[in-house]
Amino acid sequence: MDPISDSPPVKSLPTVALKKKRAMPFFNQHPWVFTGAVLSVSGNPEPGDEVIVRDDSGKFVARGLFNSNSNIRVRLYSWDENTALDRAFWDQQIKDAVALRVDYVQNESTTACRLINSEADGLSGLTVDRYGDWLLVQLTSLALAERKEILFDLLVEHCSPRGIWLRTEKGIRQLEGLEIQDGLVRGEEPDRSISIRENGLTFVVDVAEGQKTGFFLDQRDNRRALAQYTAGHRVLDLFSYSGGFGITAAALGDAASVICVDSSQPALDSAQQNAEANGVSEKIECIKSDAFKYLETARDESAQFDTIILDPPKMTRTQSGAKTALRAYHSLNDLAVSVLRPGGILVTCCCSGHISPDDFNRMLSGVATASGRRIQILESRGHAADHPVSPNCPENAYLKCLICRVL
């Protein structure tokens, strides 16, 4: 019997026993069993093996995949004692995930989307993005990486891509003990630049070298929402990357002008290319600069903008760094407010999962107090629909996007 494709019966599987009073989150289908919740392990499971998780009284909790190299000792996938983690299980999970995107996301105006969103799709440790005819895959679980051939085969079966490209996440070796390399795993190698459609606009994506898997798909609906506020505006798009917010403001929102600021010249080159593809290059100016320094210079020169977009990268990867990150968000937003005209629009985003929406709102309240400006939150937004959030795993809800009016 192949232990990866055909799971053995429950009685022969290794067992992970939980400490007393630590089982409730997992009965409630939280998928991560951290080391601190584990009482004992029996049956000598190897990293990647399927295990049964039981509470301290021996009651069945879930089936999961074990990894002694990770602080997430077990990732849970099935809460049915009779549902094994075999090929049929992974097939159904992928089929369900693809159906959501086919029904509600993919269409002629939007040809790129998050196809599988890890825990929210019942596939903890697997992320798949679709860019036209190609799939970009990230594996952040050693156990799923050991099943990668099955997963790739199922993705080909259900999605019929021209090719599948594997992207690795920074630090995954240390977190999971996972050795994995970027590269082609199925079909044809993608071009360095793939053209996609988002909200009817054209964007060129570098799927091999671009940030994350090439584009920040989670902000799709937020970019479209911003466009209704930017008619005739002078827009400043900070941390602009390839210009998603700024170009949407110019093309769909009829902004008068947009300055895209980023510290990466390749990102700005992509932004200029995307501006040309959408017929708004005359409205777009790209400037290579640190965002904080750009705002400080703008403040000192008494510059003013009608709309400012703040979409910085993650400022903390740990809970211990949340306070420091919140101070950085406060400084950034305070600088932005100082160069925003009265009645202007501030779009401020946070993709740090360790900062809660309440913490982010309190930060903005502090900016209002410190600046003496009244801030009105017009829209409190999150991920696009192809980035669903599991209520059993609230850590998935990382993205905060506030569209504000500043008086």
Image (cartoon, helix red, strand yellow):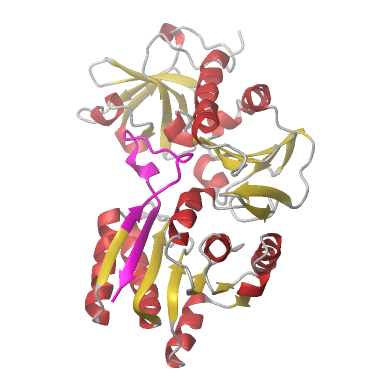
On whether residue 396 falls in the magenta region, the answer is yes
Residue 383 can be seen in this image: yes
Residue 78 placement: quadrant: top left
- At which x and y percent is residue 355? 33, 56
Whether 377 is drawn above or below 305: the answer is: above
Q: Residue at x 46, y 81 (%)?
A: 295
Which range of residues does the magenta coloring cover? 379-407
- At which x and y percent is residue 9? 46, 7
- At which x and y percent is residue 272? 68, 68
Q: Residue at x 25, y 56 (%)?
A: 358
Q: Residue at x 26, y 66 (%)?
A: 376
Horizontal relation, residue 81 to residue 199: left or right: left
Q: Nearer the viewer, residue 96 or 254?
A: 254
Whether 56 is drawn above or below 181: the answer is: above
Residue 368 placement: quadrant: bottom left
Whether 293 is drawn above or below 211: the answer is: below
On whether residue 120 falls in the magenta region, the answer is no
Horizontal relation, residue 327 to residue 247: left or right: left
- At which x and y percent is residue 16? 37, 23
Q: Residue at x 40, y 52 (%)?
A: 399
